[in-house]
Image (cartoon, rainbow, N blue to C red):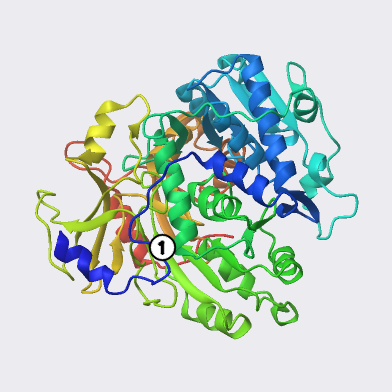
Amino acid sequence: MRDRKQRWERVWPPHAPRELKIEKALPEYVREMAEKSPNRVALNFYGREITYSEFNDFCNRLANGLIRLGVKKGDRVALHMQNCPQFPIGLFGALRAGAVVVALNPMFKQSEIEHQLKDARAETLIGLDYLYPEVEKARSALNLKTVLLTSLGDFLPDRPSLQLPPEARIPKQTFASTADFMSFLEASHSGAVNEVSDLANDLALLQYTGGTTGVPKGAMISHYGFALAAVGGAKWFNLTPDDVSLSVSPFFHIMGMIQGMTNALITGGQAVVLTRFVPDVVAEAISLNRCTGWVAAPTMLTALMQLPDMERYDISSFRYICTGGAPIAVEVQRRIKELAPGAVIVEGYGLTESISQGGTVTPLGRYKPGFVGIPNINDVKIVDLESGSVDLDYNQEGEIVIQGPCLMTGYWGRPEATAEAIKVGWLHTGDIGLMDDEGYLKVVGRKKEMMLCSGYNVFPVELENTLYKHPAVAEVAVIGVPDAYRGESPKAFVVLRSDYADSVNEQEILEWCKDNMAAYKRPRLVEFRPELPKSAAGKVLKRILVDEERERPGEANA
């Protein structure tokens, strides 16, 4: 082990500490910044600037209000929002109250929301008003006692500095059995509060992931692990109060939550928050606010660099741009260096279970094409695929396993799944990779059947389970097919029930998927089959479907 670690110590960036010790929860970092630099801008939302003093006050008010409602230490509080100031307020406020945050994907539909909230046993939800109708559909099956709703307009300036997305122009809405978030804050007092007493054992997050099976599970993340990932990321990227982070990567996702939002807020920097990724708006935001750092999905970088008039935007302020999940195309790299010559390119590898930062990341200024960096918080090694217990030498392919303080403590309510994922202290990722003689990791394969669509993990079994709810579907198998923009897109092979054979077409199935699945994971292609290939034991042979697709290469529909 010592020899393995010595490999990456040879390329360790001089500014980054080799050991980190966490002594307080993340909300305490924000409190300290508010005391030290109260008038410094923490959040910039389409031109609305929120200082650290204001942000800290909002967080305190929410925490005290939740406690007044009866939210106790360990209770789950769900956040159902796109990126907006209310998300970090909800996150840090709930954490100060001792609650465990459950971040819902704002693209989720009724059944997806219902599963996650039921599994987490959440009784409180803070959400955006225009997203609430999907929650309302599921509410009769849930035990939600309190729903606080807010509007994007609650934190927008009178004269936005950037073009607003359509949802930001929707008038504020009210619904029965809900309360107004802003009124709730106003009615609460702003006294300091911190209900976190045991960093190692108090949970901060239930962050849902498919893990290695595709069945959504809540990764239990302690306050210690959450803070370690955020502080480690801030130290690695050498963030200072002068940094301006572009915060457009989704906050509900562990990468966007830590690298896109939290890193900036614990170092006194500014987070430029955008509700959604719109290439020309993002380009304008970078130019206007002189953004210095961005952690983005590869699809975002590709779309931005493909803007036909990209040259008119000044993005030279960037000093680093980080991505992960898929290699950065050479042409995209060239364009980045052309438009932001001072920016270093960084790639990383992480999982929800390793709290994103607890995987690997490129040392600043030492990018190695094809590799996703070196371990920086946890230990990472490669083991043989057969037993999973034999350490492999460098440049030998095997399973990537991770050990260290920046890992989930297990899956919520699933001890068997936890035991399957974490063995003798090592998280078995199911990903295949190798490490070179400098400790750089290369990912050469992925979890069985998992797809990576627009930077998100998508599992066929979850899509298949949803498609089986369609009355016309008798059998279904989903695989990933190449997509030049998304990386991969799901394709569903469907066997129709005999009584629907002449009354349902492929487009109708696709439209049904739009109504029942988040946009990033819904199938983009459907093919009807009289039967699916199966083994003698009746198991669907997806490998045959994959091979057939390879023989007729094509690109998924846009």
Compare residues 107 and 382 and report the one nearer the observer. Answer: 382
Where 315 falls versus 103 (above or below)?
Answer: below
Compare residues 207 and 478 and report the one nearer the observer. Answer: 207
**Hey, which quadrant is residue 182 in on the image?**
top right
Query: Residue at label 1?
Result: 348
Percent x, y of residue 82: 66, 44
Quarter in which the C terminus is drawn: bottom right
Where 202 falls versus 359 (above or below)?
Answer: above
Left or right: where 175 falls relative to 491: right
Percent x, y of residue 355: 41, 47
Quarter in which the N terminus is drawn: bottom left
- Residue at 43% from the left image edge and 55% from the top image edge: 232
- Residue at 72% from the left image edge and 44% from the top image edge: 53
Mark 1 element type: strand
- Residue at 38% from the left image edge and 71% from the top image edge: 13
Compare residues 547 and 194 and report the one nearer the observer. Answer: 194
Q: Is residue 528 visible?
A: no
Percent x, y of residue 242: 64, 65
Numbered-mark total? 1
Compare residues 533 and 86 and report the one nearer the observer. Answer: 86
- The amino acid on which the numbered mark 1 sits, given as a three-letter code, is Gly
- Residue at 44% from the left image edge and 73% from the top image edge: 364
Q: Residues within 10 Å of mark 1 (few under 14, many from 20)?
A: many
**Hey, which quadrant is residue 289 in on the image?**
bottom right
Q: Is residue 16 visible?
A: yes
